[in-house]
């Protein structure tokens, strides 16, 4: 094979093992693809921020040496992968999409980076995102918006918009994203790829630049459910460097993908219909549910009576945590510094110059809800509402093995369309924030189109039940895209 | 929900942000809209619930690390990204005035 390469993790590994091509050549192919998608005439995707070709080629040579010697290849051997630019890679620029960290070189590897390289993945480079992962469109990046490969006048979603765009435009086979309120699943839905949110504590966050510590997750974006399962199998597991990372055994997700039991109960969240849901998105999702029923799934109706309060809950908890986490960007230890006469003035001028509007908005909101006199009315009430939403989900899971909703109320919107109305932007997270608030796993899988744009179907599962989430997603994928 | 300019200035001060006047006004407007929206929470009956600060799902967390020394980042690497450093220290504008003798 010279110019076409297999497009699944399993097939790449098999092709390398059989000597059909080299990882070095595969890496070269993907760097050509990156150059093509970033060329100004395309128009440029503006998805890649930093490339680390030398590092990827060293890794490729390591994989090729194993293949030449006939040794067993690691599980992700040769996988060309992109990393959202909120995850630290030693010696590589890690900007978080912010002027604050425009020239910051991370001094250590995140645990997920170590795991991926041990598993043989080729880390091609870092990709664009909303500043500090705050946003739903990638328009909040200091380095300009990323374009949706399906329609360059539209956003790819966010905050992991670069991750979704590069998987969709073929300049990476998979990507790492992070999800605090929907930032893996929403861009996956907007770009027509698979996005997996693992259970809170399933994947180490050591080396992830923190936004909302009780909400942040790392997870994969891929072209197929099988690839998502294989990546999760490598990423998951306890990490002594992350005290929130759970000590729960990691099953072989990929090996169990086809094992979905008959009569599987899927709960349709009745409150998800109506409201701001686009009628064509609803029709596409309802068709998908009919086909799942036809395939033997038991579709039942369940209720999340406080779903309408999830956005308000999320934007209080997340901004409160963000205001604390982002206090570290003060011009002292790393990143931007604005010169000033006094220390206090230096902090203020540095933060004024380094942060964009959405980050400042969230820091202000978070500071407000934590401030004396408002804490009980806002922050404590939001923590109580979070408990209420988690209880609703527990009750729904008593009636169903999985819950299903559209991933988003609409499809990818135009660049510039919502940027001046932050509240309208927030409301689009209605279906994705509950899983983050409750810490449960969820996946978005492509389920068709509405007016020519991709629509995502979301499955949510019980804590640490990624297996069933992936099984249902795989079942849907097999119905939706029959084997060639 | 009304937020005054004085309140915005006070929050900005707490958050170490120095907002330009036009920016402060825009933030005041946005925060009013967002805080009006989140008022929906006040109508929820949350009696009998405990505030949820962590979504762990009851999963066992790893045992604490053994109390053993391990190689650290090292001063040079830790200081490499600093805007200003000297010796083994981060340098900042002077915070203590020297007494004239």
Image (cartoon, coloured by chain):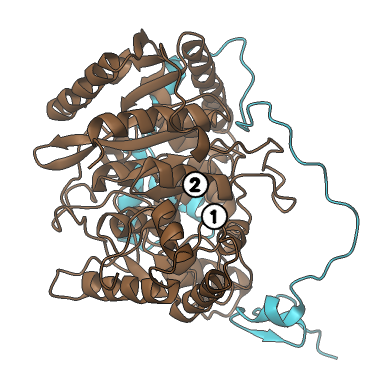
Q: Which tag, 2 or 1, sits closer to the chain's start? A: 1
Which quarter of the rendering shows the C terminus of chain A? top left
Name which residue lies at 60% across and 45% down.
A236
Is residue A464 in view? yes
Q: Residue beneath label 2, please?
A: A230
Q: The disc numbered 2 marks a residue on which chain?
A: A
In the displayed structure image, the side of residue A379 where residue A477 appears, left or right? left
User: Where does residue A431 sit, x and y in percent of width and height?
Assistant: 35, 29
User: Where does residue A229 sit, x and y in percent of width and height?
Assistant: 47, 42
Q: Secondary structure at mark 1?
A: loop
Q: Residue beneath label 1, please?
A: A75
Q: Nearer the viewer, residue A20 or A9?
A: A20
In the displayed structure image, the side of residue A413 where residue B13 appears, left or right? right
Q: The disc numbered 1 marks a residue on which chain?
A: A
Q: Nearer the viewer, residue A27 or B31?
A: A27
Is residue A218 in view? no
| Residue A274 lies in quadrant | top left
In the displayed structure image, the side of residue A123 where residue A187 appears, left or right? left
Callouts 2 and 1 close, C-beta under 8 Å? yes
Which quarter of the rendering shows the N terminus of chain A? bottom left
Chain in brown (letter): A
Q: Secondary structure at mark 2?
A: helix
Tell me what hue chain B is rendered in. Answer: cyan
| Residue A18 lies in quadrant | bottom left
């Amino acid at each position: 094979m010279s110019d076409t390469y297999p497009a699944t993790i399993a097939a790449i590994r098999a092709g390398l093992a059989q000597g059909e091509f080299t990882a070095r050549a595969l890496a070269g192919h993907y760097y050509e693809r990156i150059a093509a998608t970033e060329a100004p005439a395309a128009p440029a995707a503006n998805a890649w921020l930093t490339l680390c070709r030398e590092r990827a080629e060293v890794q490729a040579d390591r994989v090729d040496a194993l293949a030449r010697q006939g040794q067993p290849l690691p599980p992700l051997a040769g996988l060309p992968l992109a990393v959202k630019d909120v995850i630290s890679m030693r010696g590589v620029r890690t900007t978080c999409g912010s002027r604050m960290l425009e020239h910051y070189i991370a001094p250590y590897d995140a645990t997920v980076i170590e795991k991926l390289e041990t598993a043989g993945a080729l880390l091609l480079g870092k990709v664009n995102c909303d500043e500090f992962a705050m946003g739903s469109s990638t328009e909040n990046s200091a380095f300009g918006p990323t374009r949706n490969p399906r329609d360059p006048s539209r956003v790819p979603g966010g905050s992991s918009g670069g991750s979704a765009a590069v998987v969709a435009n073929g300049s990476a086979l998979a990507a790492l994203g992070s999800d605090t309120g929907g930032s893996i699943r929403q861009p996956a839905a907007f770009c027509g790829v698979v996005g997996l949110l693992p259970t809170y504590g399933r994947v180490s966050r050591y080396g992830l630049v923190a936004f909302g510590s009780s909400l942040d997750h790392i997870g994969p974006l891929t072209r197929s459910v099988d690839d998502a399962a294989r990546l999760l199998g490598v990423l998951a597991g306890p990490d002594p460097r992350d005290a929130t990372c759970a000590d729960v055994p990691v099953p072989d997700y990929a090996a169990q993908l086809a094992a979905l039991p008959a009569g599987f109960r899927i709960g349709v969240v009745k409150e998800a219909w109506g409201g701001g849901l686009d009628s064509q998105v609803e029709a596409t999702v309802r068709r998908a549910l009919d086909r799942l029923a036809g395939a033997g799934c038991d579709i039942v109706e369940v209720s999340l009576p406080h779903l309408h309060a999830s956005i308000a809950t999320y934007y209080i908890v997340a901004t409160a945590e963000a205001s604390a986490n982002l206090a570290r960007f003060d011009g002292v230890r790393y990143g931007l510094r604005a010169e000033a006469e006094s220390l206090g003035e230096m902090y203020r001028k540095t933060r004024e110059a380094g942060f964009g509007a959405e980050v400042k908005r969230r820091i202000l909101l978070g500071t407000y809800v934590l401030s004396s006199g408002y804490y009980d009315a806002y922050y404590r009430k939001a923590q109580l509402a979070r408990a209420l939403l988690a209880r609703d989900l527990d009750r729904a899971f008593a009636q169903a093995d999985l819950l299903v909703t559209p991933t988003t109320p609409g499809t990818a919107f135009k660049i510039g369309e919502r940027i001046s109305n932050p509240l309208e932007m927030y409301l689009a997270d209605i279906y994705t924030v509950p899983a983050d608030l409750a810490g449960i796993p969820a996946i978005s899988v492509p389920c068709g189109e509405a007016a020519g744009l991709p629509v995502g179907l979301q499955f949510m599962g019980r804590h640490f039940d990624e297996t069933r989430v992936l099984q249902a997603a795989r079942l849907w994928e097999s119905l939706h895209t029959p084997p060639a | 929900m009304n937020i005054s300019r004085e309140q915005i200035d006070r929050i900005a001060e707490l958050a170490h942000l120095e907002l330009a006047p036009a920016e402060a006004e825009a933030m005041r407007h946005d925060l009013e809209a967002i805080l009006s929206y989140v008022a929906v929470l006040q109508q929820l009956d949350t009696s009998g619930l405990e505030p949820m600060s962590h979504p762990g799902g009851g999963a066992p967390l790893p045992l604490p690390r053994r109390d053993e020394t391990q190689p650290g980042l090292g001063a040079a690497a830790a200081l490499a990204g600093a805007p200003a450093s000297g010796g083994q220290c981060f340098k900042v504008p002077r915070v203590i005035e020297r007494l004239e003798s």
